[in-house]
Image (cartoon, rainbow, N blue to C red):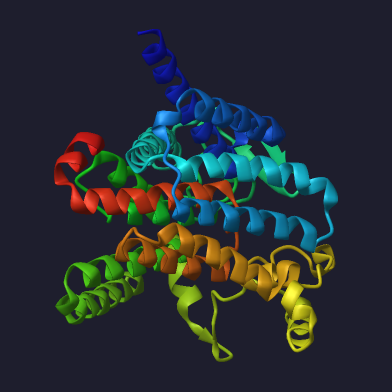
Amino acid sequence: MLMIFVRKNILMAYKLSMLILFFSSMHMWTFWGIERIVMMLSFFTSISFYLFCKSFFVITNKKIISVFLLSLFFLYLVFVVENITGVLGAIISISIFSVLIFLKDHFRVKLLVFILKCFSALLSVSLLYFLACFLLDISLPFTYTDYADQYYFRNYYFFLTYDTNWFFVLPRFQSVFLEPGHLGMVLSFLLYTQKFNLKRWYNVIMMISAILSFSLAAYVLIITGIIMINIIRNKNSIFYILIAILFTFMSISVFVDRLDQENMFNKLIIERLTIEDGDIAGNNRFSDDFEKEFKRKINTTDKWFGWQPDFSIYGRGNAGYKRYIATNGIIGVVVFVLFYLSCCKGYGIYSYSLLLLYLLSFIQRSYPNSEFELIPFICGVSFLQLINVNSVFQKRITG
């Protein structure tokens, strides 16, 4: 009885520590400045969980390969930038995610569902206050705050908005996190692991939040994810999907044309899809100076291991695959792809399609070593496989 009590409490402590780590990696404002403490908490909880609950884990050759590639991935990122002091942080991250990799699939699924429900509960409260403030014009208390002296916000405690003058009815929804784009991207991953099943309340909340983030990247990822899910389910559905997408965009175009051109959807989505100088207007992740250096360096041997430029000289922005290659090189891309591929092995076609979605996101936001990408992916491949083959387990675990 005592051991059962201890195991249940350690399991709950582990779930809470991974939830906090997930939130912290998304830069939830309550954890600003204490990210290292959160990481250490997750490290000690993960190790304790493994030591006291070994029956919850399974070690196979496939998982050992994944852990090896995980270690190679994190240590490569440290040594390629000659950051020897970062070795300890890499070891801590390797330990946390090794425990997650060795964790049995049905416990990974339980962890993911726990994160989904807590995340959606937080978003529900955040949405309620957000809509009350901007749609009902209810005055809510707020303070001014900043992150790293770069991002400036009005902090309404249950949600953040950028400290700027808005000419729209609604600002971009970002809940209590640093960027609406990050929020939309993560939500698109989580929704894919659920196969966009809007019969579950938490998926509905996540979809609404993704829409209100007004993130073009999130919209693209969600539409792409829905297409992939339907193609896998029914290979003959591609024609009907394309017709539905075409009809949707035509309807949106007519709707937007009837509205004031200064509306939020038009500014942040439609105008960014227009073609300017032979390129999509929304493809503006890199400054001209960085683009010039990248084109020059990519034709030299520096492309293999990166050249670690000082990005401060290029101004703000410059986020995406080119930044990742400049910092970590093409070898860095190969290493992380190999690790993610190893996590997919044995989990069916849905896991590989999830990886394709991650690679599409990598083009704009390159964070393959972040906790908010690793946790949904490692747990997501287990969820997609178990839920796909066991309908009884699905009803029991996702209710």
User: Looking at the picture, how far across and down is residue 378, in whole percent?
Assistant: 45, 50
Q: Nearer the viewer, residue 32 or 69?
A: 69
User: Looking at the picture, how far across and down is residue 199, in whole percent?
Assistant: 19, 46
User: Looking at the picture, how far across and down is residue 380, in whole percent?
Assistant: 38, 51
Q: Nearer the viewer, residue 205 or 325?
A: 325
Side of 233 where 323 appears, left or right:
right
Q: Nearer the viewer, residue 263 or 58?
A: 58
Q: Residue shown at 28%/70% (left/top)?
A: 227
Q: Residue shown at 30%/40% (left/top)?
A: 202
Quarter of the image with the N terminus is top left
Does residue 308 sit above or below 154 in this rendering?
A: below
The quadrant where residue 58 appears: top left
Q: Residue shown at 53%/26% (left/top)?
A: 51
User: Looking at the picture, how far across and down is residue 194, in whole percent?
Assistant: 29, 51
Q: Could you tell me if residue 222 is visible in this image? A: yes
Q: Residue shown at 69%/69% (left/top)?
A: 323
Side of 136 where 88 appears, left or right:
right
Side of 78 where 266 appears, left or right:
left
Q: Could you tell me if residue 177 is visible in this image? A: no
Does residue 299 sit above or below 200 in this rendering?
A: below
The quadrant where residue 299 appears: bottom right
